[in-house]
Image: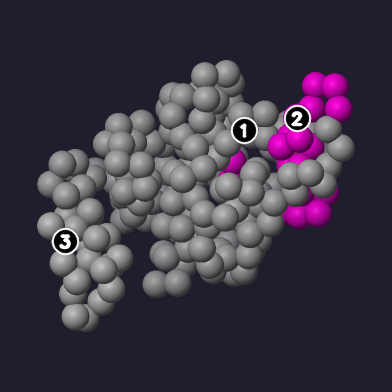
Amino acid sequence: MTSFNATGTLGDAIEAESFRILAERVDLSGWGPLSGAVVARVIHASADLDYATTMVADESAVAAGVAALRSGAPVIADVEMVARGICGPDVRCHLGNGHAGPGLTRSAAGMREAAASHAGGALVVVGCAPTALTEVLRLAAEDGFAPALVVGLPVGFVGAAESKAVLRASGLPALSNVGEKGGSAVAAAAVNAMWRLARA
């Protein structure tokens, strides 16, 4: 049972106990210091130890994300649920601002709108819609969209694993995972981990 610590809050005590349990159950020593911190936060947010082996987080890519946050770059989120889970940096979500049409979902249209407003240097995070990630990749390949880092962690049975595989092959600075798992909580956790690193 977790008890209140006089030097911190109950939430602090719960978090510390959670990371203690995480350290007992999974070995993250093979990760670099930056990528390891991100993977630990993702596992902490999901209680899913599979992320220790399925995350793809290159140390230099994570460093690019940390540097972007440190410099004040905006974070572009695919959906409001992702945006609401991120604490600290300037987060923007263009869902509903773009014009969806045949073959273009609302989240993809929002990414198109975001690219028009933030052509370079933003940290893009996709935690819900594979179509948003696919549109980010198209914008980068065809229209010169140049994010500092793409956090691609959409979830789902349709297009999620495939869009993440294309992201990893794209040459863009990227953080993702292999497979269908992902979601708003883990995407936000990855950005929150980098925000903590940026402030350290």
In depth, the one of 190 and 31 nearer the eye is 190
- Work out which quarter of the rendered image holds the C terminus and state it: bottom left
Inspect the image, locate mark 2, and give the three-letter code of the amino acid beneath it: Thr
Q: Which residue type does callout 3 highlight?
A: Thr
Q: First in sequence: mark 1 or mark 3?
A: 3
Which sits in the foreground, 124 or 128?
128
19 sits left or right of 84 in the view:
left
Q: Is residue 67 visible?
A: no
Query: Image quarter for residue 8?
Result: bottom left
Q: Is residue 183 visible?
A: yes
Q: What's the magenta region?
A: 101-126
Q: Secondary structure at mark 3?
A: loop
Q: Residue at x 64, y 44 (%)?
A: 79
Q: Quadrant of the N terminus?
A: bottom left
Residue underneath mark 3: 2
Q: Which type of secondary structure does the marked residue at label 1 adopt?
A: loop
Q: Which residue is mark 2?
A: 105
